[in-house]
Amino acid sequence: MIILIGSQKGGCGKSTLAVNVASLLVLEANADVLLVDADPQGSMARWVQDRQTRAELKNIPCVQISGDIRQNLKDLASRYEYLVVDVAGRDSSELRSGLAIADVLLSPLRPSQYDLDTLPHLAEVYSLARDFNQNIKAHLVLNLCPTNPVIKEAEEAKAYLQEFPEFQLAETLIYDRKAYRDSIAEGRSVLEWKDEKAAESIRLLLKEVLHHA
């Protein structure tokens, strides 16, 4: 299965989500997973490098690719149970070519107007991709949501996202927790950290995505 994690805007926690999804598959499902870093920023590859310096952590392999990634992904998918692919937070060759072969698009969005304004263009790109890949399923997840219950940004964003029925909106919200940043800095996932709420959010999200895949 190819899980493509992409968006039309940076700063939405895309790479952090990617490494946590991959870690969950490896650590709790004992799956054969390859991380594919197709984002020129290379955040996911750096996380893997940090992880490899810690002998107590289970290795998660990673490759970096760019450009038209369709054939690369097709070849790699024949050798691994899951590919978790991180592409740049913008419209790119990697995003478009990845959508042409992926099984799942998982697109994180902050519950902010700037992020929500990117949805019409993402919907257009996704619609074009479905001309070549009719089996792909697309999921939106609200990420970096405020933990203060008084702030209603996430609920307001969910209402707006109902206008895009081509996307499955995850019921699970990913909150802006320090554990995500702290664990990433040490080459770990939140499943290897001390915040069970953060870890459980990743479990619930992936369960939703795989159920609808």
Image (cartoon, rainbow, N blue to C red):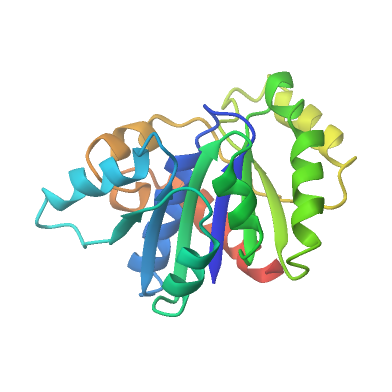
Q: Who's the residue at 20% across and 46% down the image?
A: 49
Pick out the residue farthest to the bottom: 78
In the rendered image, which quarter is residue 16 located in? top left
Left/right placement of residue 183 relative to residue 56 reads right
Q: Position of residue 120 (x, y in %)?
A: 82, 35
Q: Quadrant of residue 206?
A: bottom right
Q: Residue visible at 11% across and 50% down?
A: 54
Query: Is 138 drawn above or below residue 8 in the view shown?
Result: below
Q: Is residue 181 left or right of residue 134?
A: left
Which quadrant would the C terminus be assigned to in this image? bottom right
Q: Nearer the viewer, residue 45 or 100?
A: 100
Residue 141 visible in the snapshot: yes
Give the number of marks.
0
Which residue is more in the foreground, 162 or 88?
A: 88
Front residue of this view, candidates 45 and 14: 45
Q: Is residue 167 something one can see in this rendering?
A: no
Q: Position of residue 136 (x, y in %)?
A: 71, 65
Left or right: 39 with respect to 152? left
Q: Is residue 23 left or right of residue 152?
A: left
Height in image: 147 above or below 121? above
Residue 173 place in picture, x, y as percent:
63, 42
Query: In the rendered view, would you say 44 is above or below 209?
Result: above
Q: Quadrant of residue 116?
A: top right
- Residue at image coords 28%, 61%: 60
- Residue 82 position within the rendered picture, expressed as x and y whole percent measured from the top left: 46, 70
Quarter the N terminus occupies: bottom right
Name above or below for residue 207 compared with residue 170: below
Report the front residue among 48 and 91. Answer: 91
